[in-house]
């Protein structure tokens, strides 16, 4: 990897060069990969349509870069360490050579079952190595994968199948997440009652629960695998052919299918993985995300494999069989880098330090955070108790739409400040703009975060609805990609994400990010987590409504309210004090841990009869519980 930055001076030089010569910079990075034909033009773009094409005219197959090119030197190196949900079950290690054979064989299974280049394939599987095999087998033959998190409802699956017009579903009989059985095949069967495009369903036998097999459409993975050829030449693809569709939440509650294409995503995934995490050969990288989300796509599957890394894949949850499981996995596999979400960190904080004590975490060198801005209390707990003060924390900002990390410290190279994403990666041209769309130059500014020049991992469209892509991301500010996030650039030029811009509060003329207020509330020792939204206020324009989860020790709620408002006053100013504080047992979150503030906003103004789709929430019952006791 001759593109790995090794010092802060080199970062500054590389960043300057990448901004002044973006096409030359990304061409040099791309030269590290194998191509059947090099590009005719590095980049062609405009943000009005929008239209972005990277490495135009190039021909390649991403799986040759993930697997084939490593076989000479890394054939016997472990590509995937698999840790099952049940700690009593046996761990599996899959080498690059074994993974290559399995991908080729399953690619032939797909072809034997009628899959062609350009077909969309829905994958609804547990976190097992076969999920990675299925993804790469699709890419091997030019099929487009659409992975759905193995916990979504049948309606959510059906919506995604119908939107992408998928021709096949790859699933499993079932899976245990913690001690809960999820009957995946039964959920798929329910979904398919509302779909008419599916011709085949391939079922992996994971736990041996009873399933009904439809003789016309359903086949077992193991039966098909046994009779498939072991050799499969990679389909030669165009740089801008679709690699995958990944559905993400829309502001209306209707999911949108974000489309990523092959070459640009490949280059960006590998570059960001190698640099942000400063990956070194023989390190064990552990990303706790599910592959059903973009974090799993980029930093469990593609980024690590493109870089020749060893990645730990975990089927279970951090709190099963108890809240020490994550630390036990780190100890067992001698993990060097741990990349997880603030939601997970806060829940493990809540469980107590006794679950960390006694675990040997000495192999950890680097820590990462993803999914939302990490609050200061969680940052310090993570740093002190898990990193022992010696592991740099990379607090990464990016989105499904960006394909990979955009703003982050480089581990051990860039300075870190709790709750700051710090600096953009090379090639990323940020702009902070005011509501008139004027770029705010210099430091000590805040506004909406935009990006004014394309990067290779940028989304190309939203599947089947390009206008939705244009209006969501490119219509708000002229000639810029609008992230939808608010941002501060401090006096030193470091970046801090303040939360979704549609969650920015304007109280008495003051512009306050939801993350800023939540961070202050979460500093209270009896607060586990909070979410704040705006509600109409006759005098201030907007007031702040806080939903707060507190510890079981709390008895005097009126006293706690007073302490929280005083704390917010101290941390931000009296203008930021919540007008209303409601104590709740949980928050409405998607299965990736994202708080659905559109629901909380409606609850805050009393619109409890029209909350939109809540089926994609981790626990829809939480919404009913909150509504019963609204202030």
Image: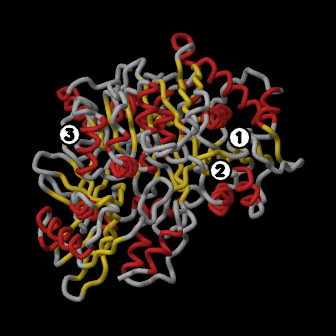
Q: Position of residue 431 (x, y in %)?
A: 25, 53
Residue at 61 percent across and 31 percent down: it is 89
Tag 1 secondary structure: loop
Query: For residue 416, which numbered disc appears in the image?
Result: 3
Disc 2, disc 1: CB below 8 Å?
yes
Q: In which quarter of the image is residue 410?
A: top left
For marks 1 and 3 on the same chain, the one whose residue lies earlier in the sequence: 1
Q: How crowded is mark 3: few (under 14 residues within 10 Å), some or many (20 or more)?
A: many
Q: Position of residue 137 (x, y in %)?
A: 66, 33
Q: Mark 1 points at which residue?
A: 207
Q: In which quarter of the image is the N terminus?
A: top left
Q: Can residue 438 be seen?
A: no
Name, please, the residue furthest toward the top.
72
Q: Quadrant of residue 162?
A: bottom right
Disc 3, disc 2: CB below 8 Å?
no
Tag 3 secondary structure: loop
- Residue 153 sits above or below residue 202 on the image: below
């Amino acid at each position: 990897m001759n593109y790995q930055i090794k010092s802060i001076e080199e970062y500054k030089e590389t960043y300057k060069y990448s901004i002044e010569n973006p096409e030359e910079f990304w061409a040099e990075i791309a030269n590290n990969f194998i191509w059947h034909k090099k590009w005719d033009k590095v980049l062609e773009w405009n943000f009005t349509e929008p239209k972005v094409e990277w490495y135009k005219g190039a021909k390649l197959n991403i799986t040759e870069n993930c697997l084939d090119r490593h076989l000479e030197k890394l054939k016997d190196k472990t590509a995937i360490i698999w840790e099952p949900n049940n700690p009593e079950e046996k761990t599996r290690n899959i080498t690059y050579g074994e993974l290559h054979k399995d991908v080729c064989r399953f690619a032939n299974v797909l072809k034997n079952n009628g899959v062609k280049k350009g077909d969309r394939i829905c994958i609804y599987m547990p976190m097992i190595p076969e999920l990675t095999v299925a993804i790469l087998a699709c890419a091997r033959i030019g099929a487009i994968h659409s992975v759905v998190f193995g916990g979504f409802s049948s309606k959510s699956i059906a919506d995604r199948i119908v939107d992408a017009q998928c021709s096949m579903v790859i699933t499993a009989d079932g899976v245990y997440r913690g001690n809960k059985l999820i009957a995946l095949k039964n959920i798929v069967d329910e979904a398919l009652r509302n779909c008419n495009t599916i011709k085949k369903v391939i079922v992996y036998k994971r736990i041996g629960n009873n399933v009904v097999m439809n003789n016309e459409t359903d086949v077992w993975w193991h039966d098909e695998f046994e009779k498939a050829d072991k050799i499969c030449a990679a389909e030669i693809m165009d740089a801008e052919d679709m690699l995958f569709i990944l559905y993400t939440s829309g502001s209306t509650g209707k999911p949108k299918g974000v489309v990523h294409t092959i070459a640009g995503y490949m280059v960006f995934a590998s570059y960001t993985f190698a640099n942000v995490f400063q990956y070194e050969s023989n390190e064990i990288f552990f990303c706790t995300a599910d592959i059903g989300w973009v974090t799993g796509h980029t930093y469990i599957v593609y980024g690590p494999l493109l870089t020749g890394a060893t990645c730990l894949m975990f089927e279970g949850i951090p709190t099963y069989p108890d809240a020490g499981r994550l630390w036990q996995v780190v100890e067992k596999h001698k993990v060097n880098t741990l990349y997880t979400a603030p939601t997970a960190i806060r829940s493990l904080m809540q469980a107590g330090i006794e679950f960390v004590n006694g675990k040997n975490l000495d192999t950890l060198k680097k820590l990462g955070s993803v999914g939302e801005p990490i609050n200061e209390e969680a940052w310090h707990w993570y740093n002190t108790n898990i990193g022992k003060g010696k592991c740099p924390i990379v607090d990464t900002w990016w989105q499904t739409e960006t394909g990979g990390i955009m703003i982050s410290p480089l581990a051990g190279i860039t300075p870190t400040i709790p709750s700051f994403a710090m600096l953009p990666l090379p090639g990323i041209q940020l702009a902070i703009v005011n509501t008139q769309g004027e770029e705010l130059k210099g430091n000590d500014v805040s506004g909406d975060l935009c990006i004014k020049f394309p990067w290779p991992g940028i989304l190309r469209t939203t599947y089947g609805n390009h206008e939705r892509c244009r209006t969501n991301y490119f219509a708000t500010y002229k000639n810029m990609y609008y992230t939808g996030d608010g941002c501060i650039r401090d006096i030193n030029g470091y970046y801090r994400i303040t939360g979704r811009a549609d969650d920015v509060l304007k109280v008495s003329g003051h512009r306050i990010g939801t993350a800023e207020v939540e961070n202050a509330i979460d500093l209270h020792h009896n607060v586990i987590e909070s979410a704040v939204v705006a509600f109409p206020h006759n005098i201030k324009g907007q007031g702040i409504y806080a939903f707060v989860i507190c510890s079981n020790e709390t008895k005097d709620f009126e006293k706690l309210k007073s302490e929280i408002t005083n704390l917010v006053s101290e941390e931000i100013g009296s203008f930021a004090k919540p007008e209303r504080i409601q104590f709740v047992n949980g928050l409405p979150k998607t299965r990736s841990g994202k708080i659905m503030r559109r629901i909380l906003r409606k609850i805050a103004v009393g619109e409890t009869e029209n909350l939109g789709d809540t089926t994609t929430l981790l626990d829809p019952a939480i919404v009913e519980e909150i509504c019963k006791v609204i202030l």
